Each structure stands twice: as C-alpha cells, then as structure tokens.
Amino acid sequence: MFKQIWRKTLFDQKISLLIWIISLMAMSLLVMFMFPAISEQGDAMDQMMAAFPTEMIELFYGGAVESVTSPIGWLNVELYGLLIPFTLIIYGIGNGTYTIAGEEKNKTLELLVTSPISRIRLALEKYFALILGMLAILFSLTAFMSIFNGFFELDVKPITFFVGGVEVFTLALFYTSIGFALGTATGNRGLSMGITYAITIFSYLWNGFGGLIESIESTTNLSPFYHYSGLESQGSGVNLVEVIVVFLLSISFVMISIAIFNKRDIGT
C-alpha cells in the first residue's frame, strides 16, 4: 500500500499519462517531419502569412510569427503557439477538477478522509501529483524535441526548448490551479471545469482581440496569454518575475480552496 497519496495518484494515472506523452510526441514528430518541405517553399509561405493582419496572426496562431519557414517560426505556428499550451491546459484542468471533486462525486473521497491523514495533506499531495504529471509530460516532450529536431533540419538548441517548456508550464499552471481550487472548494467537478474553461477561453480571446479593439488594448496585459511567448530565437532567459507572480497567484488560489475544503461537509 502506498504511504503517500501523491504516489498512489500518479500510479493510478500511469496509463493515461503515457497516452498524453505519446500523443504529443506523435503530433510533434509529424510537425517536424513536415518542416523540410515547408522550408523549401521559401518566401512563398512567408508572403502568404504576411497577407494576414498582424492582429489576426496573433489571435489564430497564439502570438507574432517571424518567418514560418524558419525552425522557430514553424514550431511556434504548429506547436508552441496553441497546440502544446492548450493540450497541457486541458490535461491540467481535467485532472485538477477531478482530483478532489471527481473523487467526491464517485464516493471514493469519503474513504480517504476517514484514513489517518489530514484533509490539508490530502489536498496538497493531490495538487503535488497534478504538478508532477504536468512536468512529466513537458519533460518528456522537451527531451524528445531536443533529441530529434536535428534529424529534420530544424537544429534548435535544447535550451530553447527548455525555456519554451518553462513558458508552457507557467501558463498551464495558472489555469490548472484555478480548476483545482474551484473543484476542491465546491466539490462540483462539472461546474468547476466549465468555469475554468470559460476563464481560459475568455482570457485568450481578451488578449487576442486586444489588437483589434482599441478600448481594451491597454488591458490585455492582465491576461496570462499576453505574457506567453512560446519559443524565442532571440535570447534564452526565463522571465523570473512573471514565473514567480504566476506561482504565487496559483498557490494562493490553491491554499484558499484547501482551507475551505478542510471545513466543508462532504457528506461523510
């Protein structure tokens, strides 16, 4: 029997985690495989992208695109602009809202809270397992991209993928923590998931439409997506201030929800 809840949680998710990892690797492999053919198009692809307004590019591709025929530009358009961040966000929200609220609905949480472990420790270990699952997905993908991108004429440095992974994790952690907090505080997974997805989509669109609607342009920096940059060809540093701010906000949401969970009636 597992003495730590987080170990048991990860053990129970081993098959689903493997599926998430393999699926992302497969999509990434396909994108890398396409790059040599795209790079041969030269200016034609860049001219096609240039025909779109800058604001529309940022909305539909998750940010500004330098050159779609460059390795960084191609990977941002196809992977790091939207696909990888939203994949990890979906994983985080889905598991975050289930970890307490889902077990409560399935009546398995009652057994856990009657064991000799405090509710606070139970929730913290569940949250810890959630973070480890996200890190396992990102670490596996980052290692895969770092090793195999050179085989497809991309030749992107591993540090670039590492920094991109930190960017993805920081963004996903924020929305995952909101989902976990709502599920833990309310015990209603469906409602928590719906609200968290709504917040995610709203904040993404708020940032995307900021360049199109002058009245909200000055407020787009309130959206976490405004600060997300994906892969960057210039520089390889992580903005520690942004990471710390997101981490503190995420922990604040989680700690408030755990305090509520520690007091509320779950029907035991």
Image (tube, rainbow, N blue to C red):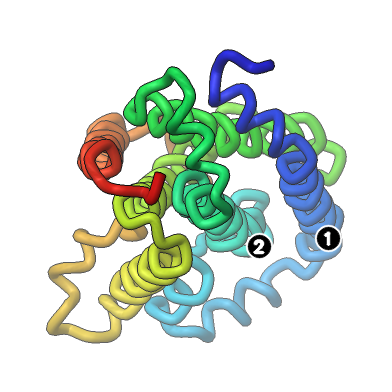
- Quickly name the residue at label 2: 78
Q: Amino acid at mark 1?
A: Met
Marks 2 and 1: which is nearer the front?
Answer: 2
Q: Quadrant of residue 234?
A: top left
For the residue pair 266 and 26, the one nearer the viewer reads as 266
Residue 80 appearing in the image: no
Say what secondary structure mark 1 lies in: helix
Task: Report the side of 226 relative to 99 (left or right).
Answer: left
x and y percentages locating residue 268 in the rendered image: 40, 44
Dot 2: few (<14), some (14–19), or many (≥20) neighbours within 10 Å?
A: some
Task: Report the side of 260 relative to 50 (left or right).
Answer: left
Task: Report the side of 222 relative to 121 (left or right).
Answer: left
Q: CA distance from mark 2 to mark 1?
A: 10 Å
x and y percentages locating residue 63 in the rendered image: 44, 64
Q: Quadrant of residue 222?
A: bottom left
Q: Earlier in the sequence, mark 2 or mark 1?
A: 1
Q: Amino acid at mark 2?
A: Glu
Q: Is residue 22 above or below residue 235?
A: below
Say what secondary structure mark 2 lies in: helix
Name the residue at the front extreme: 268
x and y percentages locating residue 112 in the rendered image: 50, 32
Task: Report the side of 37 relative to 113 (left or right).
Answer: right
Q: Residue 34: which numbered mark, if any? A: 1
Q: Are marks 2 and 1 in contact (CB under 8 Å)?
A: yes
Residue at x 51%, y 60% (from the top left corner) = 66
Residue at x 83%, y 51% (from the top left corner) = 26
